[in-house]
Image (spheres, rainbow, N blue to C red):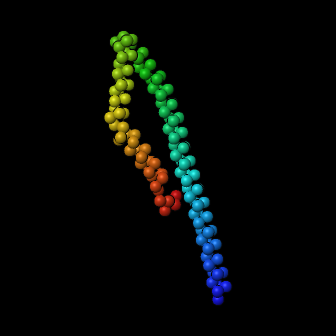
Amino acid sequence: MLEAQNNTFRKLFEEGKKYLDLQIDYAKLTATEKISVLLGMSVLFIIILVLSVGAGIYLSFALVYLLEPLVGIVWSYTAVGAVFLLLIALVVIFKKRFILVPITRFISKLLLDDDKNPQ
C-alpha cells in the first residue's frame, strides 16, 4: 500500500514538473513573440521617421523656392521656419493625445493581452 502511494506521488510530482516546464517554455515563446513585435514596430517607426525627415527637408526647400518670388528669399525661409515652429508647438501641446496615449495603448495591448482568443 505504501509503495503504491509513493509511486502515485512520484507520478504526480513528475507530471507537475512536466507541466511547469511546459508553462516556462510557453512564457518564453510568448515573451519572444511580444519582444519581436515591439522591436519590429520600433524599427518600422524609425524608418518612417527618417524618411519623413528627408521628405520634410525637400518639401520645405520646395516651399521656400515657391514663396521666393512672392516675398523674397529671407521672408520665405522665415515663413517656413515659422511653420516648423508652429508644428513643434502643436506636437508639444498635444503630445499626450498624439504620442503618449497611442504608444501606451499599443504596449499595454501587446504585453497585457490575455491570449485567450486564438488568432
Residue 58: x, y in percent? 47, 22
> Relative to 13, is 110 above or below?
above
User: Quick one: which residue is furthest to the front in this view?
Assistant: 2
Residue at figure coordinates x 36%, y 37% from the top left: 95
Q: Residue at x 37, y 12 (%)?
A: 74
Check the image and report above or below for 43 versus 32.
above
Q: Position of residue 29 (x, y in %)?
A: 58, 56
Residue 14 x %, y %: 64, 72
Query: Is the residue 59 above or below the residue 29 in the image?
Result: above
Q: In the image shown, does 71 or 14 lie closer to the viewer?
A: 14
| Residue 45 percent location from the top left of the image | 50, 38
- With respect to residue 118, does 72 lie above or below? above
Tell me if I can see residue 67 in this picture.
no
Residue at the (48%, 33%) spot, across then down: 49
Seen from this angle, which residue lies furthest bottom?
1
**Can you say which quadrant of the picture contains the N terminus?**
bottom right
Q: Nearer the viewer, residue 104 or 21?
A: 21
Q: Quadrant of residue 59?
A: top left
Q: Nearer the viewer, residue 86 or 76?
A: 86
The image shows a total of numbered marks equal to: 0
Q: Is residue 26 left or right of residue 101?
A: right
Q: Quadrant of residue 28?
A: bottom right
Residue 37 at least partly seen:
yes
